[in-house]
Protein backbone atom coordinates (compact mmCIF):
# COMPACT_ATOMS: atom_id res chain seq x y z
CA UNK A 1 0.00 0.00 0.00
CA UNK A 2 1.61 3.35 -1.03
CA UNK A 3 2.25 5.97 1.63
CA UNK A 4 -0.15 8.85 1.83
CA UNK A 5 0.79 12.52 2.19
CA UNK A 6 -0.38 12.31 5.81
CA UNK A 7 2.21 9.61 6.47
CA UNK A 8 4.95 11.76 5.01
CA UNK A 9 3.71 14.79 6.89
CA UNK A 10 3.75 13.02 10.24
CA UNK A 11 7.24 11.77 9.58
CA UNK A 12 8.90 14.88 8.23
CA UNK A 13 6.69 17.84 9.06
CA UNK A 14 4.51 18.91 11.96
CA UNK A 15 2.21 21.81 11.05
CA UNK A 16 4.65 22.91 8.38
CA UNK A 17 7.81 22.71 10.54
CA UNK A 18 10.36 19.90 10.21
CA UNK A 19 10.50 17.65 13.25
CA UNK A 20 13.54 16.23 14.97
CA UNK A 21 11.56 13.28 16.35
CA UNK A 22 9.97 10.62 14.18
CA UNK A 23 6.51 9.11 14.58
CA UNK A 24 7.76 6.33 16.90
CA UNK A 25 9.13 8.95 19.36
CA UNK A 26 12.62 7.54 19.05
CA UNK A 27 15.79 9.59 19.26
CA UNK A 28 16.62 9.45 15.55
CA UNK A 29 17.64 12.93 14.40
CA UNK A 30 16.43 14.08 11.02
CA UNK A 31 19.43 14.60 8.76
CA UNK A 32 17.76 17.01 6.34
CA UNK A 33 14.78 19.35 6.58
CA UNK A 34 13.78 18.60 2.99
CA UNK A 35 10.83 16.26 2.28
CA UNK A 36 11.54 12.87 0.63
CA UNK A 37 12.11 12.57 -3.11
CA UNK A 38 8.95 12.51 -5.16
CA UNK A 39 6.77 13.91 -2.37
CA UNK A 40 5.80 17.01 -4.36
CA UNK A 41 5.23 15.14 -7.62
CA UNK A 42 1.64 15.56 -8.68
CA UNK A 43 0.64 17.44 -5.53
CA UNK A 44 -0.31 20.65 -7.26
CA UNK A 45 0.74 24.25 -6.83
CA UNK A 46 -0.84 24.83 -3.35
CA UNK A 47 1.10 21.93 -1.86
CA UNK A 48 4.33 23.08 -3.47
CA UNK A 49 3.73 26.58 -2.12
CA UNK A 50 3.08 25.30 1.41
CA UNK A 51 6.24 23.18 1.32
CA UNK A 52 8.42 26.06 0.10
CA UNK A 53 6.93 28.35 2.73
CA UNK A 54 7.67 25.77 5.42
CA UNK A 55 11.30 25.51 4.33
CA UNK A 56 11.60 29.30 4.28
CA UNK A 57 10.17 29.59 7.81
CA UNK A 58 12.50 26.82 8.97
CA UNK A 59 15.69 28.53 7.78
CA UNK A 60 14.55 31.95 8.96
CA UNK A 61 13.79 30.42 12.36
CA UNK A 62 17.28 28.91 12.51
CA UNK A 63 18.81 32.31 11.82
CA UNK A 64 16.70 33.96 14.51
CA UNK A 65 17.35 31.23 17.08
CA UNK A 66 21.10 31.82 16.83
CA UNK A 67 20.54 35.23 18.47
CA UNK A 68 20.25 33.85 21.99
CA UNK A 69 20.21 36.41 24.78
CA UNK A 70 22.97 36.46 27.41
CA UNK A 71 22.22 37.91 30.83
CA UNK A 72 24.58 40.37 32.50
CA UNK A 73 22.49 40.95 35.63
CA UNK A 74 22.85 38.45 38.46
CA UNK A 75 19.39 39.20 39.87
CA UNK A 76 17.82 38.65 36.45
CA UNK A 77 19.59 35.31 36.11
CA UNK A 78 18.39 34.14 39.53
CA UNK A 79 14.85 35.21 38.72
CA UNK A 80 14.80 33.38 35.39
CA UNK A 81 16.23 30.17 36.88
CA UNK A 82 13.52 30.27 39.53
CA UNK A 83 10.89 30.79 36.83
CA UNK A 84 12.13 27.77 34.91
CA UNK A 85 11.95 25.51 37.95
CA UNK A 86 8.46 26.75 38.83
CA UNK A 87 7.26 26.02 35.28
CA UNK A 88 8.42 22.41 35.45
CA UNK A 89 12.04 22.59 34.26
CA UNK A 90 13.26 21.03 37.49
CA UNK A 91 16.27 19.08 36.14
CA UNK A 92 19.42 20.85 35.08
CA UNK A 93 23.11 20.69 34.33
CA UNK A 94 25.53 23.61 34.24
CA UNK A 95 29.04 24.61 33.28
CA UNK A 96 31.23 27.33 31.79
CA UNK A 97 32.41 27.97 28.27
CA UNK A 98 34.58 30.54 26.55
CA UNK A 99 33.09 33.17 24.28
CA UNK A 100 34.73 31.65 21.20
CA UNK A 101 33.19 28.21 21.82
CA UNK A 102 29.79 29.34 23.03
CA UNK A 103 28.22 29.37 19.56
CA UNK A 104 29.20 25.75 18.98
CA UNK A 105 27.79 24.81 22.38
CA UNK A 106 24.45 26.50 21.66
CA UNK A 107 24.27 24.89 18.23
CA UNK A 108 24.98 21.44 19.66
CA UNK A 109 22.40 21.78 22.45
CA UNK A 110 19.77 23.01 20.02
CA UNK A 111 20.44 20.16 17.59
CA UNK A 112 20.28 17.47 20.26
CA UNK A 113 17.84 18.88 22.81
CA UNK A 114 15.93 21.71 21.01
CA UNK A 115 16.77 24.26 23.70
CA UNK A 116 15.84 27.18 21.43
CA UNK A 117 12.42 25.90 20.40
CA UNK A 118 9.63 28.47 20.27
CA UNK A 119 6.45 28.28 22.32
CA UNK A 120 4.49 26.58 19.52
CA UNK A 121 6.98 23.75 19.11
CA UNK A 122 7.14 23.30 22.89
CA UNK A 123 3.37 23.01 23.02
CA UNK A 124 3.35 20.40 20.26
CA UNK A 125 6.07 18.39 21.95
CA UNK A 126 4.15 18.51 25.21
CA UNK A 127 0.98 17.29 23.51
CA UNK A 128 3.00 14.37 22.10
CA UNK A 129 4.25 13.39 25.60
CA UNK A 130 7.74 14.73 24.94
CA UNK A 131 9.80 16.85 27.30
CA UNK A 132 11.33 20.27 26.65
CA UNK A 133 14.60 21.97 27.47
CA UNK A 134 15.85 25.55 27.66
CA UNK A 135 19.25 27.22 27.91
CA UNK A 136 20.22 30.16 30.13
CA UNK A 137 23.50 32.06 29.63
CA UNK A 138 25.21 34.51 32.00
CA UNK A 139 28.31 36.57 31.20
CA UNK A 140 30.71 37.35 34.03
CA UNK A 141 34.48 37.93 34.16
CA UNK A 142 35.04 37.16 30.46
CA UNK A 143 33.43 33.71 30.88
CA UNK A 144 29.95 32.52 29.90
CA UNK A 145 28.14 30.40 32.49
CA UNK A 146 25.37 28.18 31.14
CA UNK A 147 22.46 26.24 32.63
CA UNK A 148 20.42 23.75 30.61
CA UNK A 149 17.01 23.28 32.22
CA UNK A 150 14.99 20.15 31.36
CA UNK A 151 11.45 19.20 32.28
CA UNK A 152 10.67 16.40 34.70
CA UNK A 153 10.68 12.84 33.23
CA UNK A 154 7.06 12.43 34.30
CA UNK A 155 6.09 15.33 32.03
CA UNK A 156 7.54 13.63 28.96
CA UNK A 157 10.49 11.71 27.60
CA UNK A 158 13.55 13.75 26.69
CA UNK A 159 16.92 12.77 25.30
CA UNK A 160 18.85 14.85 27.87
CA UNK A 161 17.78 12.49 30.67
CA UNK A 162 19.71 9.69 28.95
CA UNK A 163 22.75 11.59 27.72
CA UNK A 164 23.47 14.18 30.43
CA UNK A 165 24.10 13.94 34.18
CA UNK A 166 21.15 16.00 35.36
CA UNK A 167 20.44 17.16 38.90
CA UNK A 168 17.00 17.58 40.40
CA UNK A 169 16.58 21.11 41.75
CA UNK A 170 13.66 20.02 43.94
CA UNK A 171 15.86 17.74 46.08
CA UNK A 172 18.26 18.76 48.82
CA UNK A 173 21.26 17.15 47.11
CA UNK A 174 20.57 18.76 43.73
CA UNK A 175 19.65 22.30 44.73
CA UNK A 176 20.69 24.89 42.17
CA UNK A 177 23.51 27.03 43.61
CA UNK A 178 24.66 30.26 41.97
CA UNK A 179 27.19 32.66 43.47
CA UNK A 180 26.68 31.46 47.04
CA UNK A 181 22.87 31.35 46.82
CA UNK A 182 20.67 28.26 46.57
CA UNK A 183 17.14 27.81 45.28
CA UNK A 184 14.88 26.34 47.97
CA UNK A 185 11.17 25.89 48.70
CA UNK A 186 10.11 27.77 51.84
CA UNK A 187 6.70 28.31 53.46
CA UNK A 188 4.93 31.56 52.65
CA UNK A 189 4.93 34.18 55.36
CA UNK A 190 1.44 34.68 56.75
CA UNK A 191 -0.21 32.35 54.25
CA UNK A 192 -0.58 28.69 53.45
CA UNK A 193 1.54 26.92 50.89
CA UNK A 194 5.16 27.17 49.82
CA UNK A 195 7.18 29.26 47.38
CA UNK A 196 10.47 28.99 45.51
CA UNK A 197 13.03 31.55 46.61
CA UNK A 198 16.76 32.11 46.93
CA UNK A 199 18.78 32.17 50.12
CA UNK A 200 22.44 32.02 51.10
CA UNK A 201 24.01 28.62 51.41
CA UNK A 202 24.84 27.40 54.90
CA UNK A 203 28.55 27.91 54.28
CA UNK A 204 28.17 31.46 53.03
CA UNK A 205 25.85 32.39 55.91
CA UNK A 206 28.31 31.02 58.46
CA UNK A 207 31.17 32.90 56.76
CA UNK A 208 29.17 36.11 57.08
CA UNK A 209 28.56 35.49 60.80
CA UNK A 210 32.24 34.99 61.53
CA UNK A 211 33.20 37.96 59.35
CA UNK A 212 30.79 40.28 61.17
CA UNK A 213 31.99 39.20 64.61
CA UNK A 214 35.64 39.59 63.66
CA UNK A 215 35.10 42.93 61.90
CA UNK A 216 33.23 44.54 64.80
CA UNK A 217 36.01 43.57 67.23
CA UNK A 218 39.04 44.42 65.09
CA UNK A 219 38.17 46.41 61.95
CA UNK A 220 38.10 50.16 61.51
CA UNK A 221 35.02 52.27 60.91
CA UNK A 222 35.67 52.45 57.15
CA UNK A 223 35.99 48.67 57.00
CA UNK A 224 32.62 48.34 58.75
CA UNK A 225 31.08 50.70 56.18
CA UNK A 226 32.36 48.51 53.37
CA UNK A 227 31.12 45.36 55.10
CA UNK A 228 27.60 46.76 55.55
CA UNK A 229 27.50 47.93 51.93
CA UNK A 230 28.61 44.52 50.68
CA UNK A 231 26.07 42.71 52.86
CA UNK A 232 23.16 44.92 51.86
CA UNK A 233 24.07 44.61 48.18
CA UNK A 234 22.90 40.99 48.23
CA UNK A 235 19.89 40.13 46.03
CA UNK A 236 16.67 41.01 47.81
CA UNK A 237 14.85 37.70 47.52
CA UNK A 238 12.67 36.56 50.37
CA UNK A 239 15.08 33.98 51.78
CA UNK A 240 18.07 36.32 51.51
CA UNK A 241 16.15 39.15 53.17
CA UNK A 242 15.38 36.96 56.17
CA UNK A 243 19.03 35.97 56.54
CA UNK A 244 20.20 39.58 56.25
CA UNK A 245 17.78 40.47 59.03
CA UNK A 246 19.40 37.87 61.30
CA UNK A 247 22.90 39.08 60.38
CA UNK A 248 21.89 42.68 61.04
CA UNK A 249 20.63 41.71 64.51
CA UNK A 250 23.96 39.95 65.11
CA UNK A 251 25.87 43.06 64.02
CA UNK A 252 23.95 45.33 66.39
CA UNK A 253 24.42 42.91 69.28
CA UNK A 254 28.17 42.74 68.65
CA UNK A 255 28.42 46.54 68.44
CA UNK A 256 26.62 46.86 71.77
CA UNK A 257 28.81 44.18 73.34
CA UNK A 258 32.02 45.83 72.10
CA UNK A 259 30.78 49.32 73.07
CA UNK A 260 31.86 50.82 69.76
CA UNK A 261 30.84 54.45 69.37
CA UNK A 262 32.12 54.80 65.79
CA UNK A 263 30.17 51.86 64.39
CA UNK A 264 28.02 52.89 61.38
CA UNK A 265 24.27 52.36 61.32
CA UNK A 266 22.68 49.81 59.04
CA UNK A 267 20.14 50.83 56.36
CA UNK A 268 16.49 50.79 57.32
CA UNK A 269 15.26 48.44 54.60
CA UNK A 270 16.55 46.14 51.87
CA UNK A 271 14.90 46.68 48.47
CA UNK A 272 12.82 43.85 47.05
CA UNK A 273 13.71 42.16 43.77
CA UNK A 274 10.73 43.09 41.66
CA UNK A 275 9.73 41.54 38.37
CA UNK A 276 12.56 42.36 35.96
CA UNK A 277 12.36 42.81 32.22
CA UNK A 278 14.30 40.31 30.15
CA UNK A 279 17.30 42.14 28.73
CA UNK A 280 20.89 41.39 27.93
CA UNK A 281 23.24 41.10 24.98
CA UNK A 282 23.04 38.76 22.04
CA UNK A 283 25.72 36.15 21.53
CA UNK A 284 26.71 37.57 18.15
CA UNK A 285 27.09 41.06 19.57
CA UNK A 286 29.19 39.77 22.47
CA UNK A 287 31.51 37.93 20.08
CA UNK A 288 32.01 41.05 17.97
CA UNK A 289 32.66 43.24 21.02
CA UNK A 290 35.23 40.75 22.32
CA UNK A 291 37.01 40.67 18.96
CA UNK A 292 37.05 44.48 18.83
CA UNK A 293 38.55 44.74 22.33
CA UNK A 294 41.19 42.14 21.52
CA UNK A 295 42.16 43.94 18.32
CA UNK A 296 42.39 47.28 20.13
CA UNK A 297 44.53 45.70 22.84
CA UNK A 298 46.91 44.19 20.30
CA UNK A 299 47.20 47.52 18.45
CA UNK A 300 47.96 49.33 21.70
CA UNK A 301 50.68 46.80 22.53
CA UNK A 302 52.24 47.27 19.09
CA UNK A 303 52.22 51.05 19.49
CA UNK A 304 53.83 50.85 22.94
CA UNK A 305 56.54 48.53 21.67
CA UNK A 306 57.39 50.78 18.74
CA UNK A 307 57.19 54.02 20.74
CA UNK A 308 60.84 54.02 21.78
CA UNK A 309 62.20 52.47 18.58
CA UNK A 310 63.92 54.76 16.10
CA UNK A 311 64.39 53.60 12.54
CA UNK A 312 67.91 52.98 11.41
CA UNK A 313 68.66 55.55 8.73
CA UNK A 314 71.89 55.07 6.81
CA UNK A 315 73.40 57.80 4.73
CA UNK A 316 74.10 57.00 1.15
Image (cartoon, helix red, strand yellow):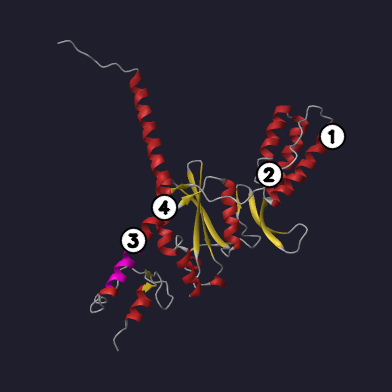
- Total number of numbered discs in the rendering: 4
Q: State the residue at coordinates (52%, 45%).
A: 72
Q: Residue 288: x, y in percent?
A: 38, 42
In the picture, measured across the screen, residue 254 lies left or right of residue 152, that is right
Within-10-Å neighbours for mark 3: few <14, some 14–19, many 20+: few
- What distance separates the C-alpha of mark 4 from that of mark 1? 55 Å
Of labels 4 and 3, earlier in sequence is 3
Q: What residue span does the magenta drawing correspond to?
A: 48-58
As drawn, the label of residue 59 is: 3
- What distance separates the C-alpha of mark 3 from that of mark 1? 67 Å
For this orientation, the residue located farthest to the bottom is 1
Within-10-Å neighbours for mark 4: few <14, some 14–19, many 20+: some
In which quadrant of the rendered image does the N terminus lie?
bottom left
List the residue tagged with mark 2.
Answer: 271
Q: In this rendering, is residue 17 above or below 252?
A: below
- What distance separates the C-alpha of mark 4 from that of mark 3? 14 Å
Of labels 3 and 2, earlier in sequence is 3
As drawn, the label of residue 56 is: none
Mark nearer the viewer, 3 or 1: 3
Q: Nearer the viewer, residue 214 or 66?
A: 66
What is the secondary structure assignment of the residue under circle 3? helix
Mark nearer the viewer, 1 or 2: 2
List the residue tagged with mark 4.
Answer: 67
Q: Residue 300: x, y in percent?
A: 38, 27
Of labels 3 and 1, earlier in sequence is 3
Q: State the residue at coordinates (29%, 74%).
A: 46
In which quadrant of the rendered image does the C terminus lie?
top left
Of labels 2 and 4, earlier in sequence is 4
For this orientation, the residue located farthest to the left is 316
Amino acid sequence: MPETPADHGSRHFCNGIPRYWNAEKSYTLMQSPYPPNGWLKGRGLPTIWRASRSLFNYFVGCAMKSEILIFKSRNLLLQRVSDQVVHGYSHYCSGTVSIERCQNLVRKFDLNYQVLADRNLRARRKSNDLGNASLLLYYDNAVIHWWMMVTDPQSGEHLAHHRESLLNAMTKEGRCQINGCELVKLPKKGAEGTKMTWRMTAKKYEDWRLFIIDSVRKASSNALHNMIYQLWSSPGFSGVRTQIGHLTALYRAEVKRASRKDAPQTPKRLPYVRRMQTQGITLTQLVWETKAKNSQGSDACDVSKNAGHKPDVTKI
